Each structure stands twice: as structure tokens, then as C-alpha cells.
Amino acid sequence: MELDRETLQIFADQFIHRWDRYPIQNGDGSYTGVKWEALTLAHVEKHIRGNITLGAYALDADSRARWICLDADDPQEWDGIKNLAVKLSNQRVPAYLEPSRRGGHLWLFLTPLSGRDARRFGKQLLKEHNLETVELYPKQDELRTGPGSLVRLPLGIHRKDGRRYHFITTTGEPLAPTIRAQIAVLANPARVPQPFVKDVLKRAPKAKRHSPTPHFEKRSQVIGDTPAEKIKNAISVYDFVSNYVQLDRGGRGLCPFHDDHVESFSIDQERNYWHCFAGCEGQTVIDFWMKWNKVDFKQAVKELAGMLLPPLP
Ligand SMILES: [Zn+2]
């Protein structure tokens, strides 16, 4: 297969947000093999030829996104996002369907947006179409540590089943007859019209922001002999951390302290501590804040006291 390098470059630029490192998919479908070296067009070519399978990070180094990807994990969710694609195309909003192993992806190409707004846009769309269980990429509003979430770069081979998945139209036809023709289409995808994005964002709830600091309800009295003890008694780890990390109802989420793709971070609500299975150490609200704000214990206690404790008389 002859690949036109210029088209390949434009295709890659649509999907790939950063070239300073790249993840490779393993045989079990996971992406532990992050290569700490520059990604090149030669790698992208190998991906298309099926020699390797690349993942594409969902945010660039400035936490901006050129696409969102809705990830349907089973046939039922897949039907849901195919329906969404039809409804969107009726509103002249282009959306690209990519079947996968169990379900599939719906890609929406954007005029670059902050990760926060890209996610607000995606979440609102899912909510309005009763698809809230469908996963949304990017998974982070903004990068704190590590490059964040990723999706398999399209048109390569899924390492787990050895198959290559073509894009399809809303009626189930191939988007273009050959991989080469698909690359050409995806190199210049139609973007979601700006007025549509703005309208959806107008209806979307405002995002929680990291700064300014979220407002914590201060209790008039907090038990504890030291400021550190008082801080730990002033708020549960779950209530505090959920202002900063996207957690599911069970208290799990992507660890903000390492390059996490498998939701290693969890909170034990009963025993009131956080834990990362990949070994990022800590337990309390204070440990969390030391890592989050990159401050020492003394500074963390000072900052948290200001946020959580009643002012000194
Ligand atoms: Zn971690």
C-alpha cells in the first residue's frame, strides 16, 4: 500500500495532540508501553500498516482538544451513539462513526477548545440524548500530571483481536472504499459548526474550576488538637478530592499523580482515605494537597486551614 506522506501527516495532525511521547497498545488492549521519545510520521505509517498500534492523547500539552470521542462499550451503547450520529447529521452536525471490538467510537471534530469546554460540550450532548453511561474522551478537564487519557488512533489494528476497523456512515456503509481513501477523508474532517457548540455550551452546567479554589462550607467548630487534625476532621477525603478528581460513585478515578489510564485512584469512603494502586503514596486530605499543589506539609496545612477551618478568633 502506497501512502501519500502529506495526507498521512494531515491525518495524524487531526488526531494526535502531542508528538513528544506516544503510547503503544499491548496485545491485551492496554497501553502501558508509553515511549518517552518523539513520535514521528514513520510511527504513524507503521500504525496504518499494522506493525504497531498507537494511542492518541485526548489533550495537547496546553489542555486543549481538537476532538471529542464518545466510546460505546457494548452493542446497546453503540446503537445509542449511532442514533446520536443520525440526529446530529439531521442538524448538519458532522459526526464520524468508527466501529470497534464490542461497540464503537463517535468522533466529533472541533475548532480547538479547552479540555474543560470540550468535556462540558460532550457531557451535555450525552445527557440530552440519555447516553450518560457512554464514556467521554478527554477524561480530564485539564492536565495536572502526565498526558492524560487516550484513544486508539483510528485505522490501525486493534491488538486484542487483530482486526482493523473502518469508519462507517450513519447508514452503515464504509465512509470511503479503502483505508487510503478513509485517511484522505479523515485528514480533512468536517468540524462541528461553532454556533452549535456555543448553543450546547450555553445549556451545559458550568464546570468546577481548580482555581479559584472551590468554596468549602466552613463549620463553626472543628474537633482536633492540632491544625492538621482539625483539617482531617473538617471534611471527608471524598468530598474534598472530588473537587479536583473526577470520581465515580464508588470513589474511583484516574490518578492525577501519574500517567494513569486504568483508574488506579480510589477513595475508601468508610475508612476515609485515598489510595493509588500504582503506588502514588498518600492517604489524607493533607497528603493529597501536598502532591496536588506541590507544597510541603507545613504549607499544605496553612493553605488547607485557610480553605477549611473557621478563622482564628
Ligand atoms: Zn497514581
Image (cartoon, rainbow, N blue to C red):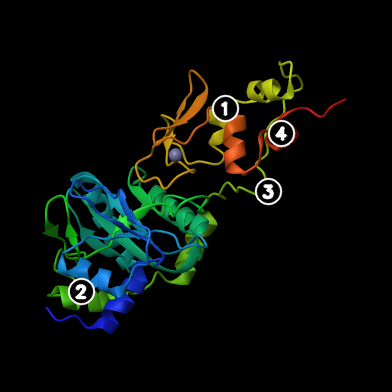
Name the residue at 58% across, 25% down: 236
Which residue corresponds to the image point at 50% horizontal and 53% vertical from the top-left?
A: 143
Give the class, few, some or many, for how many residues have Cα within 10 Å of label 4's Cα (few <14, many ≥20): few
Which mark is first along the chain, 3 or 1? 3
Earlier along the polypeptide chain: callout 4 or callout 1? 1
Given this view, does label 1 or label 2 mark the residue nearer the observer? 1
> Quadrant holding ligand 1?
top left
Q: Which residue is mark 3?
A: 212
Quarter containing the C terminus: top right
Q: Nearer the viewer, mark 4 or mark 2?
A: 4
Residue contact between numbered discs 4 and 2, judged by CB atoms under 8 Å: no
Note whether residue 99 is visible.
yes
Direction from residue 266 to residue 211 in the image, left or right: right
Q: Which disc is residue 298 wearing?
A: 4
Residues marked 4 and 1 touching at CB (< 8 Å): no
The x and y percentages for residue 116 are 51, 55
Q: Say which residue label 1 marks.
A: 284
Q: Quadrant of the N terminus?
A: bottom left
Q: Are marks 1 and 2 in contact (CB under 8 Å)?
A: no
Sequence-wise, the earlier of marks 1 and 2 is 2
Residue 3 picture location, percent across and down: 19, 80
Residue type marked 4: Lys
Secondary structure under the numbered disc 4 in the rendered image: helix
Identify the residue at horizontal 62%, vertical 26% (top origin).
235
Amino acid tagged 1:
Thr
Q: Is mark 1 within 8 Å of ligand 1?
A: no
Write down the quadrant of residue 76 in the picture. Answer: top left
Whether residue 93 is visible to the viewer of this picture, yes or no, is no
Secondary structure category for the residue under label 1:
loop
User: Could you say which disc has been placed on residue 182 in the image?
Assistant: 2
Q: Secondary structure at mark 2?
A: helix
- Which amino acid type is shown beneath numbered disc 3? Pro
